[in-house]
Amino acid sequence: MSDQALLILYGSQTGTAQDTAQRIARQAKRRRLQVRTMPLDGYNIATLISESTVVFVCATTGQGDPPDNMRNFWKFIFRKALPAGSLCQLDCAVLGLGDSSYPKFNFVAKKLHKRLQQLGASMLLPVGLADDQHELGSDAVIDPWLLSFWQRFYTLHPSLKALPSLKEDEALPPTFSFNFLEGDSDVASLATPAEQTMISSSCPFSAKLLSNTRVTDVSHFQDVRLFDFDITGSNIEFSAGDVVMMRPCNAAEDVQQFCQLLKLDPESRFTLSPTESTPVPARLLQPCSVRYLVESYLDIAAVPRRSFFELLLTFATNELEREKLAEFSSAAGQDDLHAYCSRPRRTALEVLADFPHTTAEIKVDYLLDLFPEIQPRSFSIASSLKAHPNKLQILVAVVRYKTKLYKPRRGLCSNWLASLNPEKGTVYVPLWVKKGTLKFPKDQDTPVIMVGPGTGVAPFRSAIQERTAEGKEGDQCSLLWVFFTRPVYVQHRIRENAELLMDLIANKNACFYIAGNAKEMPGSVRDALKTIFQQQGTVSSDAAEQMVVAMEQSGRLQSETWS
């Protein structure tokens, strides 16, 4: 093992940046390098000046915001008091993971790269801007970026080239070892509502589900549910625009199939021991049952990333399966992997069933390396505490669709929620609340224009309840305009009301909000707004664009979108 150390720091919201950071770490270990990998907020930033080589892997969330696990780092690194040359001893590189369907594509990575340069760091190569919208996904950028990084790294440390590297199909040590227990050892349980104080992702509140109601007609193609939760005793506070977070569970039939494929007893209990310095995940209370691990922690229903196939390859002994896994793990095989996995949305569990010989070879110690943790899902809160004290409501579209695969695809969280029936027994859902990206005006006399097709109407439902509860109902409602119509596209309705909207925006300082699917609607609404400025304000296309930009910069045009 070389004395040369590599530090990999990541900011990840959905787990993709973490997966990429861990992939880089595995490449470093195969090169016999000492490597540390951790979230940015888990790192003591004061020691950054003493590091030699650092790779930053960063996602972008919301409207150009840093992920939750790098927000403290973000505040520190942009302190004006930091000396310009404070990082002059540091060699580093920044890899961004983004989605070009969002307006501030890879904003965090771009801004961090520039800030590190300002602080004197030596940037080993240009910032990498991976795009999830690319037909081959983020790897279309990540693969060549990593090749360039290692070439640059070895240029700086030529002596390390002589170290013998491990082959790609050789297994690295697992991150944890499983210690199975004999007998009926107690399994630690989650806290009950009465035991909780500070509500957060690490200590969610177990809210009682009061109702699960379909709000679309049974003949409608989209099943949309209104969920009503009782948050009495939680001290949870929220306002219009905030979001609620929750982690779903895998379906019982998927848990059963997984345990059968890997020959695991779901009732068996174990403790975890780190093989290196990685701490045991806080959510896996010790001892833990296999059932809890598979049901509540391992994301077996997700579409697996390339790293999944890379690790499977190290177990494969069957020649045919080994050959296919090697192809899926290679840069040249990404077209085939995309066609097999990403395009039809094949799940990790289905991949295991497709590779039975390799699945039979999987060692239990590698489960936490092979499967990522189930990530929390966020939903715009669709109610106001001022209208419904001690209640929290959300609108959820149940995701079900067909691909070329025989079995219909199902969104994990929406179908898990839809399966919960409080009429058959008491149901508790662990949840916590976060500030959202939408900020509504405090001045109740400010007109508000809200564009929210589908479940995008959720935050506006909250805003309307909040405003009517605060003011004189008739006057307040006349200042709220909501566009949510179907089957007519909202951008068409906006153009039909061009004169009204121009008056509200130009003469009455109205605020404009967009919520919904990120694919095409937000851009189309923005174009419709630009057209109104051109036609009603008789200005050029460039001037209309500047008017839209000015609204965005002042906070009078805000959006909350999802893909």
Image (spheres, rainbow, N blue to C red):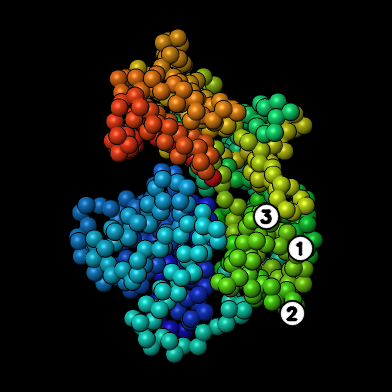
Q: Residue at coordinates 42% horizontally, 76% vertically from top-left? A: 150
Residue 272 point in image, percent of width and height: 62, 64
State yes or no: discs 2 and 3 in contact (Cβ < 8 Å).
no
Residue 377 location (% of width, % of height): 56, 44
Question: Is 53 drawn above or below residue 526 in the view shown?
Answer: below
Disc marking residue 304: none
Q: In front: 37, or 504?
A: 504
Q: In terms of sequence position, does the residue under pointer 1 or pointer 2 come before the other?
A: 2
Q: Quick one: SS at disc 2?
A: helix
Q: Is residue 124 above or below residue 136?
A: below
Amino acid type for the residue under numbered disc 2: Glu
Horizontal side of 522 relative to 400 (left or right) equals left
Instruction: State which tag comes first along the sequence, 2 or 3.
Output: 2
Gap in Å between the C-alphas at discs 1 and 2? 17 Å
For numbered disc 1, what is the local secondary structure? helix
Name the residue type under label 3.
Pro
Q: Mark 1 points at which residue?
A: 353
- Label count reads 3
- Comparing marks 3 and 1, which lies closer to the viewer? 3
Q: Classify residue 556 as left or right of residue 309.
A: left
Which amino acid is tagged 1?
A: Ala
Q: How would you rate the neighbour count of disc 2 (Cα within 10 Å): few for under 14, some for 14-19, many for 20 or more? A: few
Question: On the image, numbered disc 3 is attached to which residue?
Answer: 344
Name the foreground residue: 231 vs 506.
506
Query: Which dot, 2 or 3, sits closer to the camera?
Result: 3
Rendered-image quadrant of the C terminus:
top right
152 relative to 404 in the view: left or right: left
Q: How packed is label 1: few (under 14 Cα within 10 Å), some, or many (20 or more)?
A: some
Q: Residue 203 or 146: which is nearer the viewer?
A: 146
Find residue 28 and report its horizontal and vertical position in percent. Answer: 47, 76
Q: Name the residue under label 2.
A: 319
Residue 392 visible? The answer is no
